[in-house]
Image (cartoon, rainbow, N blue to C red):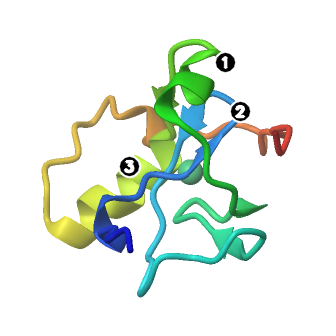
Amino acid sequence: MIYLDPAALLPVIGNVWHRARLAQVPAPGQAITMLCGQTAETAFETLARRSSHGASTQCPDCDLVYRREQGLVVRPNHPGLVPRPQRTTPMS
Ligand SMILES: [Zn+2]
C-alpha cells in the first residue's frame, strides 16, 4: 500500500505543472481537470521521467485561481492576469 496526499499532487502536462482539486488520488487513465480548465488523463511517472522533459514551470492560470482561493497575495504583475490567447498544450 502506498499512501498519497491528493492535495500534494501537482499534475504535469508537458513541462508545465498545474493544480487540481482532487478529493482522492485519481486512478491511472482517469481524466482530471486542472484549475485553469485544461483536462488530461492521469498517468504516474517517476520524478526522473518528468525531469527528462526539462525544467517544469508553473501554470500561471492555475496559480492565480489557487492564490485567490487561498486568500494569498496576487501581485499586479502576476502572469495569470495578462490576457492572452488560449494556449494549446500537447497531452504528453
Ligand atoms: Zn493550469
The outermost residue toward the bottom is: 23
**Residue 6 image point, x, y percent:** 37, 71
Task: Identify the element where label 2 is drawn.
Answer: loop
For residue 89, which quarter of the picture? top right
Is 9 left or right of 90, judged from the image as shown? left
Identify residue type, mark 3.
Answer: Asp
Mark 3 or mark 2: whose residue is earlier in sequence: 2
* Image depth: mark 3 or mark 2 in front: 2
Q: Quadrant of the C terminus?
A: top right
Q: Pinpoint residue 3: horizontal percent, then vertical percent.
A: 31, 71
Distance CA(mark 2)–CA(mark 1): 7 Å
Counting from the top left corner in percent of width and height, residue 52 is at 63, 15
Question: Which residue is denoted by mark 3 in the rendering?
Answer: 63
Crowding at dot 2, Cα within 10 Å, few <14 / some 14-19 / many 20+, comes out as some
- Label 1, ligand 1: CB separation under 8 Å: no
Residue depicted at 52% across the width and 23% down the height: 48
The reply to whether dot 2 and dot 1 touch (C-beta < 8 Å) is: yes
Q: Nearer the viewer, mark 2 or mark 1?
A: 1
The amino acid at mark 2 is Gly
Q: Secondary structure at mark 3?
A: helix
Q: Position of residue 91 (x, y in %)?
A: 83, 45
Q: CA distance from mark 3 to mark 2?
A: 17 Å
| Disc 2 target residue | 14
Under circle 1, the secondary element is loop
Front residue (pair 49, 70):
49
